[in-house]
Amino acid sequence: NAGVTQTPKFQVLKTGQSMTLQCAQDMNHEYMSWYRQDPGMGLRLIHYSVGAGITDQGEVPNGYNVSRSTTEDFPLRLLSAAPSQTSVYFCASRQDLGRNEQFFGPGTRLTVL
Amino acid sequence: GEDVEQSLFLSVREGDSSVINCTYTDSSSTYLYWYKQEPGAGLQLLTYIFSNMDMKQDQRLTVLLNKKDKHLSLRIADTQTGDSAIYFCAEIANGYALNFGKGTSLLVTP
């Protein structure tokens, strides 16, 4: 199993550009989520999904969209990038509520100029 | 959401014990977690404790849980330089997501 994979690893955008951060897992996990990590702020939840076709907002959803058309993929879309979205983005998955481990991807480092 | 609180920095000497403290917010959290993040890497689950336990030991790691005070601690025995990293405490939020603290940077000096 590859676990949780994220692409790209690094990205530089100009203000106003759009892009999609990809996340995939091959563990057949129902639950997937996106976090952003900023210095001194820890990890903050952006969006999450409890299964294909079901998504919900986390703590900091503004400026981001998600969809979950398959169990494996959970892309994060930045509609119009802003410098405040400069961050490291982590995707995570877990099997279900009864399972205790949440697996994290390696992260995408995004810079918005 | 409400904040999971952790001290930001801890410095210990190699061979000493490290204790990282955390105060969480949701008394209904079923699991509480400790994650480790090394520079430039993602988060790695170190250990977890189920809410009906007071203590869990896993090799050099000891987790203590005080549900009354909503206090969680991670003790690392015989701390090594390879233990230098950021440690995150996390609780289950809304039944699905993890609510993380801001992380404690542990520096182990020779």
Image (cartoon, coloured by chain):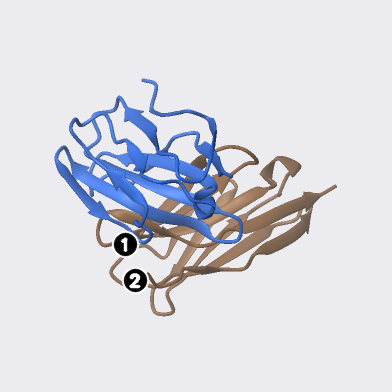
Q: Which chain is brown?
A: B
- Going from N to C along the chain, the mark reached first, 2 or 1, is 2
Residue that lies at the very extreme toward the left in this rendered image = A53
- Residue B89 rendering spot, x and y as whole percentages: 49, 59
Say yes or no: labels 2 and 1 on the same chain.
yes
Front residue of B92/B51: it is: B92
**Chain A tint in image:** blue
Front residue of B34/B75: it is: B34
Instruction: Identify residue for label 2.
Output: B26
Q: How many marks?
A: 2
Q: What type is the residue that disc 2 sits on?
A: Asp
- Residue B55 rendering spot, x and y as whole percentages: 45, 61
- Residue A28 rendering spot, x and y as whole percentages: 23, 29
Q: Chain of mark 2?
A: B
Relative horizontal placement of residue A75, taking residue B103 as reference (left or right):
left
Q: What type is the residue that disc 1 sits on?
A: Ala
Q: SS at mark 2?
A: loop
Quarter in which the C terminus of chain A is drawn? top right
Q: Which mark, residue B93?
A: 1
The quadrant in which residue B82 appears is: top right
The quadrant in which residue B31 appears is: bottom left
